[in-house]
Image: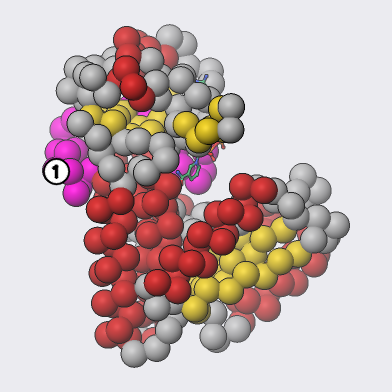
Amino acid sequence: MMLKGKPVAEKILKEVKEGVEKLGFAPGLAIVRVGEDPASKVYVGSKIRRAAEAGIKGEEHYLPETATEDDLLELVHKLNIDSSVHGFIVQLPLPAHINAEKVLESIYPEKDVDGLHPQNLGKLVAGAPVFIPATPMGVMELLSYYNVEIMGKNAVVVGRSNMVGKPMGALLLNANATVEICHSRTRDLAEHTKRAEILVVAVGKAKLITEDMVREGAAVIDVGINRVEGKLVGDVDFEKVKEKARVSPVPGGVGLLTVACLMKNVLKAAEKGKS
Ligand code: NDP
């Protein structure tokens, strides 16, 4: 069975649209893009289009590859104090000469709709989240939509980035799963993944997870995005794994939810800003 993202994303975007209508004004979302990363260009375009569909005013702020860290910090400061911007994100990755950590820390936590400011990540780990990073939030929405029970289950997350793996582990733990987080130094990855009733993979390596690494009947959420011979694929050997487990497809899975959950965070920021 496939855990498709489309119906879940549509449901979330519909709820966001209704929330925006209740607000009575269009929330402002700013997206900062620096340099020429081709994937970032595509992602930002799709975020702005989805924002418009949900009644959110999305605006791109572009800086060239040659922009300095100070140029970017100055733009972040402007957005921090701009009252028409309820939330904003800095699209990652940034060019190598810019310290992403420093930039993320300079965003006001109440406008940090990507949930990557240490204060927001800390609140998530403490079990009292405000803004949850959109990709792991999307995974939780997917699990909920398809009635995958989490409490008491063995959950394994592969990948430990601040953007996906770590917040994913925290969310599953908060939902009372027993959580393991695997990474590049994990010995015998299969030994861990085979025990998983819920397996979330966020690495960026095509076919990392093969059929023999997956437990029969598991829910497998594939966050990975890889380009292989011009085609987008995830981290899971989808065709084979789908015979024994429920799997989210790539494309058509978590990617759609990431965008929808970002809009959910923008609505939340606008609601908070109003009160
Ligand atoms: P990072 O590169 O930041 O993290 C990758 C993680 O995978 C690291 O923790 C790394 O371990 C781990 N890893 C690398 N190789 C192995 C291995 N052989 N076995 C086990 N773990 C391994 O990536 P992100 O978390 O940012 O993204 C992960 C993937 O998800 C990418 O493909 C990205 O494109 C995709 N993505 C998709 C989104 C969506 O909307 N669908 C949104 C965000 C990301 P270590 O820490 O030890 O280096």
Looking at the image, residue 21 lies above or below residue 260: below
Residue 161: x and y, percent?
52, 38
Range covered by the magenta-colored residues: 143-165
Residue under circle 1?
147
Left or right relative to 110: residue 70: right
Residue 40: x and y, percent?
62, 52
Q: Residue 259 occupies which quadrant of the picture?
A: bottom left
Disc 1, SS: loop
- Is 31 one of the magenta-colored residues? no
Give the residue at x 67% y 60%. 33
Question: Is ligand 1 less than 8 Å from the beta carbon at label 1?
Answer: no
Left or right relative to 64: residue 128: left
User: Outermost residue toward the front?
Assistant: 230
Residue 116: x and y, percent?
52, 55
Q: Amino acid at mark 1?
A: Asn
* Camera-side residue of 58 and 2: 2
Give the residue at x 49% y 78%. 57
Q: Examine the rendering and report whether any part of residue 123 can be seen.
A: no
Give the residue at x 14% y 38%. 149
- Is 160 one of the magenta-colored residues? yes
Left or right relative to 260: residue 141: left
Characterize the magenta stretch by its predominant secondary structure.
loop
* Camera-side residue of 31 and 42: 42
Give the residue at x 35% y 36%. 249
Looking at the image, residue 62 lies above or below residue 144: below
In which quadrant of the rendered image does the N terminus lie? top left
* Camera-side residue of 209 and 74: 209
